[in-house]
Amino acid sequence: MTGSTETQIELQIEGITFTGFPAVDVDRFGLGLQAELTRLFNDAGMPAPLRGGRGSGGLQIESLTAAGNAAPEALGAQAAQAIYWKLAERE
């Protein structure tokens, strides 16, 4: 019988600026971010920079483009994809 191993990842976001959007519901944004990162890690695996307990050493994503009426969860999911793929390209 094989057991599954859960890995916890701590993500610290120092700042996010939304330009051109009405007030964004930060809680809903966070839920979208967390759900999409979870999906990406489950489906695509752990990017190499995070394997073995190593940190990313910092990551900066300049900008994302989305429709002005995008739901906060969709913005969070888009941010999660940018974060994940930025980490993956460091492999």
Image: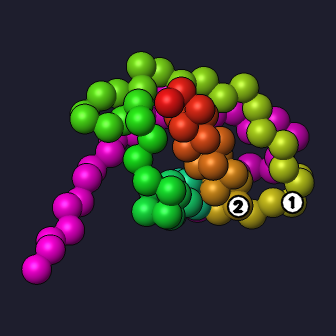
Compute the Cα span from label 2 to label 1: 10 Å
User: Residue, x 74% and y 63% (percent of image)?
Assistant: 71
Is 25 magenta? The answer is: yes
Label 2 sits on a secondary structure element that is helix
The picture places residue 81, in percent across and down from the top left corner, at 63, 49
Tell me where the magenta segment starts and ends, as one range.
1-28
What kind of residue is marked 1?
A: Asn
The quadrant of the rendering that contains the N terminus is bottom left
- How are the colours assigned in the image? rainbow
Vertical arrangement, residue 29 with respect to residue 50, above or below: below
Q: Is 62 or 55 nearer to us in this picture?
A: 55
The label shown at residue 35 is none
Dot placed on the residue nearer the N-terminal end, 2 or 1: 1
x, y percentage for residue 68? 88, 53
Around disc 2, counting alpha carbons within 10 Å, would you say few (fewer than 14), some (14 to 19), or many (20 or more)?
some
Q: Camera-side residue: 10 or 2? A: 2
* Mark 1: secondary structure: loop
* Residue with the most extreme bottom position: 1
- Say which residue appears at 15% left-offset and 74% top-offset: 2
Write down the residue under mark 1: 69
Pick out the residue farthest to the top. Answer: 57
For disc 1, the neighbor class at 10 Å (few under 14, some 14 to 19, many from 20) is few
Q: Does the magenta segment cover residue 35?
A: no
Image height of 69 relative to 63, above or below: below
**Residue that extends furthest to the front in the rendered view of this protein:** 1
Q: Residue at x 49, y 63 (%)?
A: 43
The residue beneath circle 2 is 74
